[in-house]
Image (spheres, grey):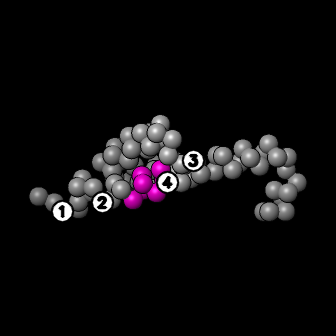
Amino acid sequence: GSTLLAFLPESVTSAMANYILPSLFGACFASMAVKKLKIALYALPMAIILRLLGVPAWITIVCCISAPFSSPTSSTRRN
């Protein structure tokens, strides 16, 4: 892979670097949203707010993946 990237123009490699992390987040989010809608409804606004505040993408991803699982709505207890 790195040999192939060496032959690509700088504009292509920088575009790939800028879009890989958000696309990974989108894939993780979509996978999670299908299984647990309540957690997805909690994580999506959090992701939007963190990005609007200028938080780096990697911190946003870590927060949005880990924080919903520690929220009170993520309980697996049934009544």
Does residue 79 appear in the picture of this structure?
Answer: yes
Say few, some or many: other residues with alpha carbon within 10 Å of mark 2 (under 14 / 14 to 19 / 20 or more). few
- Tell me which numbered mark, 4 or 3, is placed earlier along the sequence: 3
Quarter residue 12 falls in: top right
Query: Which one is closest to the eye, mark 1 or mark 3?
Result: 3
Look at 18% across and 62% down and name the residue there.
77
The segment highlighted magenta reads 59-66
Instruction: Identify whether 65 is placed above or below 14.
Output: below
Q: On the rendered structure, is 23 left or right of 73? A: right
Residue depicted at 85% across the width and 50% down the height: 8
Q: CA distance from mark 3 to mark 2?
A: 23 Å
Q: Residue 42, how many percent across, how many down?
A: 33, 46
Residue at horizontal 53 percent and vertical 54 percent from the top: 58
| Residue 37 is at least partly visible in this image | no
- Confirm or deny contact between disc 4 and disc 2 (CB under 8 A): no
Q: Tell me: 42 left or right of 75.
A: right
Magenta stretch contains residue 30: no
- Callout 4, which amino acid? Ile
Taking the image as shown, residue 2 lies to the left or right of residue 76, namely: right
Q: Quadrant of the C terminus?
A: bottom left
Q: Which residue is mark 1?
A: 77
Circles 4 and 3: CB distance less than 8 Å? no
- CA gap, disc 1 to disc 3? 32 Å
Q: Secondary structure at mark 1?
A: loop
Residue designated by label 2: 70
Cα gap from disc 4 to disc 1, whole angstroms = 29 Å
Which of the numbered marks, if any, corresponds to residue 61?
Answer: none
Cα distance between the residues tagged 4 and 3: 12 Å
Name the front one of labels 4 and 3. 4
Q: Which residue is mark 4?
A: 59
